[in-house]
Image (cartoon, rainbow, N blue to C red):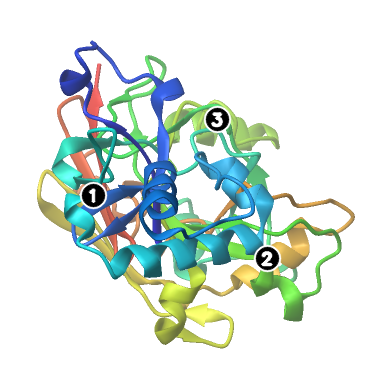
Amino acid sequence: MKLVTYMVKADELNIQSQDGMLARLGWVRDGHVIDVGLAQQCMELEQNLVFPYRLATDMLTFLQRGEQERDFLQRLDQALGQRDWLRLQVEGEPVALALAEVDLFAPIATPSSLRDFYAFEEHVRTCRQKRGLGMVPQWYEIPVFYFSNHQAVIGPEAPVKKPAYTNQLDYELEIACVIGKRGKNIKREEALAHIAGFMIMNDWSARDAQLQEVAVGLGPAKGKDFATSLGPWLVTTDELEDCRAGERWSLTMRARVNGRELSKGNTKDLHWTFAQMIERASAECELVPGDVIGSGTVGTGCLLELGEEVHPYLQPGDVVELEIERLGLLRNTIVE
């Protein structure tokens, strides 16, 4: 399933801006968003389909309730599919709305935590070469990550404010998994069962600030903490089984700036798999539902790697689109 956090478009609600308190949980089918709460009410009223409790209407609660909640939602989806679901209403409110009629937030507006790994070898090698450095032998020994700012997550179509302290604003094309099952000291062979699904991640970076910080031996901090884009939806792992071989999924990744394709890669090229990342992240540390784990940037997946001769760093007005096969398209515009 493709799970979303959404709201009816602001202008239709006669309000001036998005209000996270009005956000709802839904899923995408045939270009429409189906509201979880309304769909459950409708099926209970019209088909006597009884659930033991009300399904969650926000993403974090949905994930925290675990596998049983996901099973209930799949039952609801199947029951709805047997009806003319586009016509269903609850007290005059439609159960389904076209994607054009809603605003999408990040699937998880405030993750429990946000870790970002450094797992694509081509990206690491190329970026270090540009600084006259070779590969660090320790990179091949353990998957490494940093904690990013889980309070600075934004969704599709949201503006990204260019920090005043940077002249080198960059995008980073990544895939992220979301933890759906609590665990500590998770073994690699058991790790994939802890993944609820995947989404696109843009790890926006202020490169000049980042390079200044890491030269001191810490960071990145101000180089990364101002924004991370996630979305447009969370695709559950069962929907991607036909793309999986062992611990790897094969999904084409692309990035465009102002319509021009600059980056292309594939998730299968990860040196460190998500199973290995989860094993490392959970060592003597409990992972909980709603934790987000980023892959790090795919090879060619940022301007630092490509070089300013290919494209200058981002400026207000630039439109950045990240697209991953089966996971949708994540678009943001840079603003002052």
Q: Can you tell which mark lies on residue 194?
A: 2
Q: Is residue 33 left or right of residue 242?
A: left
- Categorize mark 2 by other alpha carbons within 10 Å: few (<14), some (14-19), many (20+): many
User: Which residue matches tag 1?
Assistant: 88
- First of labels 1, 2 by sequence position: 1
In this rendering, the answer to whether 102 lies above or below 115 is above
User: Which residue matches tag 3?
Assistant: 212
* Residue 67 coordinates in the image, percent (x, y): 64, 64
- First of labels 1, 3 by sequence position: 1
* Residue 255 coordinates in the image, percent (x, y): 25, 55
Query: What is the CA distance from the residue labelled 1 to the residue labelled 2?
Result: 35 Å
> Can you name the residue that lies furthest to the left here?
259
Query: Could you say which is closer to the camera, residue 225 or residue 211?
Result: 225
- First of labels 2, 3 by sequence position: 2
The amino acid at mark 3 is Gln
**Which element type, helix, strand or loop, lies under badge 1?**
loop
In this rendering, the answer to whether 8 lies above or below 288 is above
Closest to the camera, between mark 1 and mark 2, is: 1
**Where, by quadrant of the figure, is residue 186 drawn?**
bottom right
Query: Could you say which is closer to the camera, residue 61 or residue 252?
Result: 61
The amino acid at mark 2 is His
Q: Residue at x 51, y 31 (%)?
A: 223
